[in-house]
Amino acid sequence: MLKETSAGGGPPSRVACAIVAMVALTALVAMGPVLAYEVVTVTNGGTIDGVVSLSGTAPAVTPIKVTKNQDYCGQTIPDPSYTVDGSGGLANVIVYLKDIAKGKAAPTEPLALVNTKCMFSPRVQGAMVSESVKISSEDTVLHNTHPQNAETSATIFNVALPFKGFSVTKPLPSMPMMIKIKCDAHEWMHAWIMELDHPYYATTGADGHFSIKDVPPGTYTLAVWHEVAGANTAPVTVAAGQTTKSKITLAAK
Amino acid sequence: MLYRVAQSILMLVGALLACSAGAANTGDVKTGKLVYERYCLSCHGAQGNGQGEAAEYMSIKPRDYRQGTYKWRSTPSGSLPLDSDLEHTLLNGLYGTYMPTWRALDDRSRRDVIAYIKTFSPRFVTEKPQDPIIIPPDPGYSVASVVRGDAVYKKYNCAQCHGAGGQGDGPSAHELKDDWGNGLVPYDLTKGHVKCGDKSTDIYRVFMSGLAGTPMPTFADSLSPADAWDLVHFIQSLSPLYARNIAGAGETGGTR
Amino acid sequence: MTRHGSLRVVAQIAVFAIVMFAFISPASAIPAFARKYSLRCTACHESWPVLNDFGRNFRDNGYQLRLGRDDTVTADSGYWPVAIHVAPSYVYTKVTNQATDQGNKNIGSGGVADAGMDLLTAGVLTPNISFLVVPTGFASDGNVHLESYWAYFTRLIKNSDWFNVRIGQFEIDLPASSHRNLELTDSYLLYSYHPSVPGGTNLAGYDMGENQRGVEIVGHDANSLTRYTATIFTAHDSLGSANGFDSPSFYGHFQKYFRFNDGLVSQAEVGLWGALANYPTEFLTGGGVPIAGSGSHLKSSTRYGMEANVWLGPLAAPLHLDLVYGHGSDKKDLFQGTADRSGSFNGGFLEAIWVPAADLLHWSVFGRYDVIRNQTQPLSTTPSNFNDQNQWTVGAIYTIAYSIRDEVALHAEISSDKAKGVGNLGLDQRTNSIMFGVDFVY
């Protein structure tokens, strides 16, 4: 039997740690002098108000055909992937700033992810690293909330929501990543959390509008991400105490 | 970008700390590579990606080590396994799969190959496994406990995947996929010999740890220990194999 | 024929037999198992075909891994329990001091010999009943014989590993298997040597390393680190015997392995072994030929000794040293009146197998030194060192490829055997061999 030297097992061998140290060092050198996000008090920050709209015609979406628990979930569920209003405003888009080095603190209220009517709500949301998410179920059927690293499909955790009214709060990974969430029991259920190293993000509402507040004055890259339409960026300049209007489009796919 | 820097710094510090702590009593990666080449490579592949020459022919695929995702863990959902968890799998194999028991190997070979396998995932450098799940003693198999366990099975909707009779044929049994996109089916609980071990504690542990990388979630946040034990006994009652082996009280289980 | 002349013939036949044995020796690597369990040869073989710890345990367990995939029903449907092994090779052998009409000569010859084939069929019939059948031959002479065949019943009592029974024709559990050794040009002298009267006969002509017919009881702990075997068998070609109960022969072997968690030595083993083969020295004859079952006046040929193994470095790529010592004696009556006393000898070998820790374990380097020293010559007038032997073999194997389906290896070795006084004119005889072959199994 192995002897555990600690809860984490023993340290790796000298060869392994030397290799890892070299890899880490090389990575650092290659990246140059960049620093982690710094929380500062933001006075007279600006606001970015904008709208994300879909250019072109959104492909017709067919309702999701429910394949299990039809007695509870119904026969079909509207497909929320392209939720576009009359003027082209696209909902469920994550809007965020790129490469912002300092600014406001992480939001205080916990993220929420609700299993309701055999779907996740909200569909997409942003998060700052190491935030926790409160997962709950309003359904009588069993759900499981199974977040994975969207890039590698590696499981982050997988928690059962066996009955109505159950909730649990789970920490998110300590590294920024796109998290894709599934419910294995109901394969059509998906949600996304974009985990960033800063709190400057927002999700578009039903009309495609979003608002990012308390942005330190400066010029940034505004980025958007949608589960089907993909990503786009636009430059944005924020002036002290001012509201900057922004409009960014995503092409329908 | 910033976090990659942070990650690199963390890796560097971790590696230096690990190096200064010395390698006493832990596996030797270099030797572990030899052990891996001798015994593991044909299934798990030279890159540790689970795509060895034999993998193609297997319905249950060999583990891809690169994500640090392991089904058999004593640790909570989302955590890395302990070294002793990996050793448990080496010692016991995974029943019904191509993963045999490696009990005949010496401790050194097992210790070394565990150290080597961990190098396939950077998570073992940047993360620490969480504390193991505490498993209270098995209160013992009884008809009353089985009856209560039946109610727990219903309350927790286990039938959603495992079916009303435990045969792995619930409404969600189809179209299940693991982290690698391979299809899989819920375990037929009437067969006995669950892959993670035959002891009652092994079954208990699965409820609490979940099977990482598969659809089986953790019930640690919703299931009380008393309910969990009743559920263990109910599951044991589903298989004639266990029924034969649970004549005695205390920790129950089969032999191989 | 002179005394030395007949010995020359015996020596030549012996050399021929050894070389032929090398070609047709059923090496016991069985790719059928590799296919069945998706493991490479290296999982069971330290250096194919020498078994490692995992392979020894697998074999002791009746070729089962006991995780629900062993028997013919639950095994992969692509599995078919047959493998084929062939080893074509070039051998050059030179034997010194041979009597010819032209005088005392050293004669050497070489060529690609007529290789035979082993058809290795083995598997699990139903949980805890395994089998092995090995037809061997298929060479240009067309002969085929069953080299080995047995059924093995495991866990017969209360699911215990301490009582398993094998019945059939099999190799007794020798300290180092002579069907799984790396050397192809020389066999273990300790197993085959018998004291002799120059020009005389010895009824106990058996080679312990050959497959014997009988029943074997095997017991071992879970990991085969402590194990015993007890065998009752009919020693090969026992004149006048119909079965093992006419001329019962016995073999026993006990082994214990020790493991070390730190330091250079990773594993060590010690063992005791002993064989008592009985031969009828009187029998009824029909047309001059002994009648089976009529033998009586059993006389013994005994062998016993001890063994020690050490593995240096990691067990996955070890330097494995194996030292075996044995004492042998053949009773006077076995020499059919040509001896005036029983003959005895001491012998043994030191074998080394090194698997370098590089190149995916493709290489192995091996060597062996065999020694025979006569203690008592059965004929008191024979020089005391007559037929004392020293033999060495060194070689290397490069495995070109091993997969879960097959294996192909290049094999080269040289060997030299020196026997005191058995050559022409009572000279020492040296037999040198060089061999280069390709060994494949699929």
Image (cartoon, coloured by chain):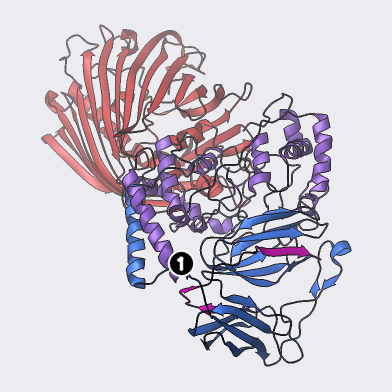
In which quadrant of the rendered view does residue B203 lie?
top right
Q: Is residue A92 left or right of residue B129?
A: right
Residue C334 locus on image (x, y percent)? 34, 12
Judge whether C111 appears above or below C430 on screen: below
- The residue at the point 31 percent across, 43 percent down is C355
Rendered-image quadrant of the N terminus of chain C: top left
- The residue at the point 47 percent across, 33 percent down is A1
In which quadrant of the rendered view does residue A213 lie?
bottom right
Q: Which chain is blue?
A: A
- Tell how many labels: 1
Subunit ID for the residue under disc 1 = B
Q: Colour of chain B?
A: purple
Identify the secondary structure beneath mark 1.
helix
Bin the neighbour count of mark 1 within 10 Å (Cα to Cα): few under 14, some 14-19, many 20 and up.
Answer: some
Location of mark 1 (residue): B3
Residue A4 locus on image (x, y percent)? 46, 37
Residue that protrudes farthest toward the right in the picture? A71
Q: Toward the viewer: C31 or C15?
A: C31
Judge whether B214 appears above or below C124 on screen: below
Q: Label 1 is placed on what type of residue?
A: Tyr
Q: Is residue C369 left or right of residue B227?
A: left
Q: Toward the viewer: C60 or B48?
A: B48
Q: Is residue A152 left or right of residue C249?
A: right
Residue A94 locus on image (x, y percent)? 62, 77
Judge whether C61 appears above or below A57 on screen: above
Q: Colour of chain C?
A: red
- The residue at the point 52 percent across, 75 percent down is A42
**A116 part of magenta stretch:** yes
The region drawn magenta spans A96-117
